[in-house]
Amino acid sequence: MRRVAFFALVLAATLTTLGFLVLPVVAIFTHVSPVTLARQLSNPVVDDALVVSAKTTALAQALVLLLGTPTAYLLATRRFRGRSLLVTAVELPLVLPPAVAGIGLLVAFGRMGLLHTSIPFTQTAVTLAVAFVSGPLYVRAAIAAFEAVDPTFVDAARTLGAGPARTFFRVAVPLAGGGLAAGEALAFARGLGEFGATIMFAGSLQHVTQTLPLAIYAAFDVDFDVTLAIGGVLVLLSAAVLIALKLATSWTLSLQTSGFRFAPSTSN
Amino acid sequence: MKRLGVLLLVLGALACGTASAAGHVTLTVYAASSLTDVLPKVGSVERYSFGGSNTLAAQITQGAPADIFASANLTLPEQLYAKGLVRRPYVLTHNALVLIVPRADPARIHSITDLRKPDVKIVIAGPTVPVGAYTLQVLKTMRMTDVLDNVVSREADVRDVLAKVALGEADAGFVYATDARTVPKKVTVLRLPVWARPNVAYGIAVVTASKHRDEATAYLRMLLGKRAQTTFRSYGFLPRRTAG
């Protein structure tokens, strides 16, 4: 009897959780028909926001990958004093409220800030805000991915005469590939949804700094259809990212399976 | 199972706490962000949600639990009144629109026409925010809509505009005189020509769906009363010109 009651409770909790998490997403699509969604895609506000989001996300993620990968590699493969302090510093933006990130960027890069630049209110500001809040997600995942690479492979490559650069590109990165891709997918999704830091650091101007999330906010009281349509677009994009993430993860697993004799899988 | 029981007990206690706290009514006031400083000085037990009046109106339309709506224009309360979402609106107070520049005045703006200089970074509120609409109205009256090319951001409410100018990141912005007064050391106020000044009137109304209509009505009356109006004036608001 008790067992049945327990199972019923667990089932009820699961159903409630599922319903709660799925309902808002379903609600967006019940309120905006595919026709409205398609029509709103030609709305200049939505169009401009899509372009701004695409541009800034692409640039920000390029920055994240180019700078974050070597950073993560160094932090994962070297042991030195203060390393954990550095790792914590890299992770801090992850737990920082976005509004704090925005004000921090403003007093760092603002005209009256430490570096006296004229970056605020430009697309560069959006890019930096996105990189700031999403980068740590990637770096964190990348450190874990590089740490999981079996050092015997790296050592083997080095003994066989490959230089450090060649080892990095041909051994470490491919072996950590799945983890890197998974980290990047998360960073991409987080960056796409960036709101707080952007609105404080870059402001909001259609065609210049107004990204999709900012456009949702600006359209909220003007045209609820536009809000819903952008919401629908973002749901689809986010779902695509999530599926990519799943694929990346299964890629890691298959890689690890092939090298199982040498590197017992730690994940899953 | 025991733990679950404890959890239920805690939840029950929380629910009781909320219920007993509701013994005396705490009104929820949705108010224009330019009222941020003055309203808490006038009332005492209200809960506030300050923001762009347009955002607040949209939230009330979506069923937000407001008892009172105080807007920085008359249009929004009248629109909600026409939809039956609020009861009859009254004029609460008046304000003046001003141009502000950071104390350091990096772009050397001495009059509104200086906004035309190239590369001046102007921050204004979005067109549906009351202060943004007044800003557009002034620029139209003065035949200066070309300065909109220098706008670098359209903010969600007047306090966001104020913050960006006060920080020195923007060269100029349009806010209410009462907002500028809150950061006297950080911004310089430039008055607009009398003939171009918009009539900034605040509308206030009881929300129809309020569960505390009587208390909300009493609160509204109190705000229109002599003592509250004196406080409003001490914060730089202009006397009510239109009787209820």
Image: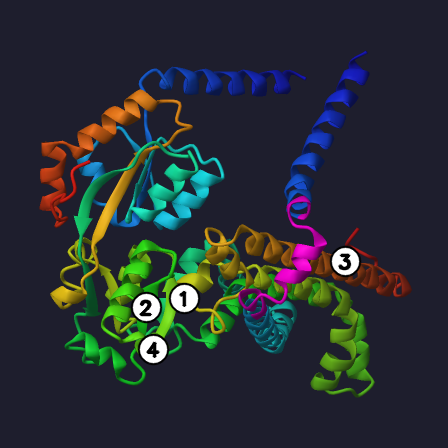
Q: Secondary structure at mark 4?
A: helix
- Give the amino acid type for the residue marked by disc 3 in the picture: Ile
Q: CA distance from mark 2 to mark 3?
A: 40 Å
Q: Secondary structure at mark 1?
A: loop
- Taking depth in this image into account, of A85 and B13 the one nearest to the observer is B13
Which numbered dot is residue A243? 3
Tell me whether circle 4 and circle 2 mark residues in contact (CB < 8 Å): no
Q: Which residue lies under the disc numbered 4?
A: B150
Q: CA distance from mark 4 to mark 2?
A: 9 Å
Image location (x, y in percent) of residue B122: 30, 72
- Give the amino acid type for the residue marked by disc 4 in the picture: Asn
The answer to whether tags 4 and 1 share a subunit is no
- Taking depth in this image into account, of A3 and B82 the one nearest to the observer is B82
- Give the amino acid type for the residue marked by disc 2 in the picture: Val
Q: Which residue lies under the disc numbered 2?
A: B123
Q: Callout 2: 10 Å neighbours few (<14), some, many (20+)?
A: many
